[in-house]
Image: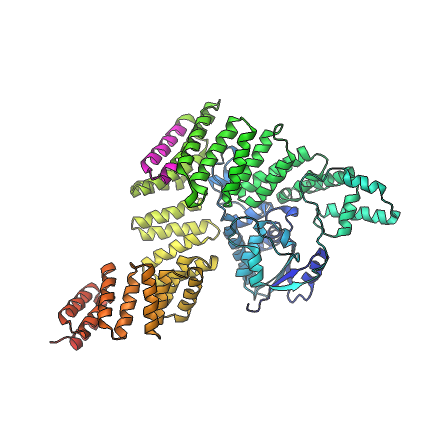
Amino acid sequence: MEPTPHRWIRAARHRDRRRLLADGLDAPVLADLDAHRWLRGPYTAVGALLRGLVPTVLAERPDLVAAHEIELLSVAPELRELVPATRETLTSLAVPEERTRFYPRARTLRLAHGLVEFLDAWLRHLDDGPRCLLVENLHEADPTDREFFAVLLRRADPTRLRLRLATTAAPVEEPPGPAAAPLGPALRRYAAPVDGDRTGPLADLPRPTGAETTGVAASNAETSVEPAGMKAAGTEAAREYVRGDCVDDDPTVLAAYRTLPAAVRADLHDARADELLATGERSWRLGAVTLHRERGGAPATAGVQALRDALEYCVNLGFYHATLEYGARGRALVDWSAQMEHWWAFTTKMTTSLMALGRPIEALALYDEARAHTDSAMVHMQAAYATGMIYTRHLETGERDHRQARAWCNAAIAYARLAPDRQQSAAHLVFNRNGLALVAMHEGKLDEALDLVTRGLAELDEALGAGQHHLHRSVLRHNRSQLLAALGRREEALAELDAVIEVDPNHVEYHLDRGGLLRRLGRDEEALASYDQAIRLSPPFPEVHYNRADVLLELGAVQAALAGFDRVLDLEPEHLDARINRAGLRQALDDTEGAWADVRAGLDLAPGNAYLLCVRGQLELEHDLAQARRTLSAALAVDPTLAAAWAARGAAAYQEGDLAAAVADLSHALALDDDPAVRFNRGLALADAGRHAEADADFQACAAADPDLAAEVREHRARLLPA
């Protein structure tokens, strides 16, 4: 690993980590953060960083704050008092009863990239040397903070920011399921380890399970004998532990906390929760308030309500790991038979999160449990719909079962008819039929799917008022646009999509889809405008930049396209298509070193990729013709339709004097793509082989197709062909 200014502090105890974090600082401290999720839940550390920075940034660079308002307000809700929200969508504004769409799993990664760029721009603005950022308890951080620091480790400019990130000495565990930016590998790759005490036993921190209200510890305390001064000191330490929101890992402090009578502990937790709520800061309710209410005097009521509040907030923001944690803690506190409404809320938000996180099998198990626990038609309807979506969409491709999905969607439709309220029944019917339309689309029954969506829109208009279910109406119209496009009715699809954008202009995916549709209609300049709008409306994500760069390449704007692929790979180094395109562009622009770097990186990701092998073969033409032919043959074994590989292998054969092979390969290339430059090369090979009439035909066809080659063609005709 190249030398890095970043440090990974590893020690068993908080006191050792604090010492090592502050030891030998070589730059001013930008911020000193505690990332423990018990404090403020998702984005505990990043939120604290932004609450400290944004007032100053707003005074000096309001444009920078405005450009990143989505990231700032998503991560630090308290900033809404300072930063106006100008890019709300129907999704962000929907009331809970009408929330039919949730954010994709990748949203937090987009937020992380945007915040990294916000921080980098601010440090560039200061331009006064590097700063240090100190972060403790990263091993106990919510996955949102972990993801941010993983991205920051990779992308931070080390001349401006030096990270000191502290974890326990034990291996950093990753949450279950796929992770776009795992913390452990980032720490190992981009930070130099600094080890403290590895021998001390890890503190047995009490976990927030709602079980801390029993009187077991109190009975032990009553039988212990200790000096009064020591007991008083221990009591004060225990009180400080609660006031510090229970993140201290000192065994002495923990022991003192456990010896407090249960009623005293509960009173301390309730008092601390009241104190935090009085601040009015929303993020406390996502962490410490839930913890203190669980351990307070009324875990089954106040604790459950605090967890429910945090759960609803986090699922709506796309903080799915936190939603899972709150759901599990809430389910541990409620009696499903007496508190079904709470129990189902915790359960169904967990299943939504599991599906978003790519863990559908676990979601299926929870839906089966719910069906076994209740005869509620509403619960069965929601579970049936979601089960259908799992079978048609969320399972791995080879495990999907559209017949099962159709059966579950039909069951959901049947339950929807049981709703006593006519408007509610209509809304549920349309929602569930939209699920059936997705199944039909996956089955290839596009006309059926279009009919279901179109009828759903008409039924909503008939049954509901104009001010209801705006979000779901927009979802239906978007789905209708996609189906029209799939049926080849592109102009109608564009009109439908334009209508959706008119009512929900800030939803970025609509502009991304519009760009793709305009490309298929051959309207590339308008497609670029749609992609540009998507970029303005969203935290950065690679797909829109890739599509934009691809259009620029089609339009011949090579340098702009190259910059676009650079941007994609800055956001996602493993984006294979961008790597392939940039390798080819660099090779064409004679950036041999850059092309080789992309080829090697790409082949590490996809060793048998035909396009990368083709570029490697083209690069090898410069110094090893035999190896180039072998590499290009390997590319053609993977993809025999790759015209560029046939053309390059033909060029290699020509340079080696194998004229028959050269003519054969170049002819293959022309059969796939009648490129004037390839036709010119075949003309050279034919002329050298004495096949003058065929060579002359190629030369003349080349000159007619590409006037820029006409002078070179005349020169070679005069030199190679008989008069």
On the rendered structure, is 135 left or right of 684? right
The coloring applied to the image is rainbow
- Residue 447 position in % (x across, y down): 31, 36
688 w.r.t. 473: above or below: below
* Residue 149 on the magenta segment: no
The single residue placed furthest to the left in the displayed view is 723
On the rendered structure, is 610 left or right of 187? left
Let me know if residue 681 appears in the view. no
- Residue 33 position in % (x across, y down): 65, 55
651 w.r.t. 211: above or below: below
Q: Quadrant of the C terminus?
A: bottom left
What are the residue bounds of the magenta stretch?
Answer: 439-461
Let me know if residue 364 appears in the view. yes
Q: In which quarter of the image is the N terminus?
A: bottom right
Q: Which residue is drawn at 46% across and 53% down?
A: 541
On the rendered structure, is 100 left or right of 449? right
Q: Residue at x 30, y 50 (%)?
A: 523
66 w.r.t. 158: above or below: above
Q: Which residue is nearer to you in this view: 38 or 390?
A: 390
Q: Which residue is nearer to you in this view: 88 or 242?
A: 242
- Residue 168 position in % (x across, y down): 66, 56
Q: How many marks?
A: 0
What is the chief secondary structure element of the magenta stretch? helix
- Residue 386 position in % (x across, y down): 47, 36
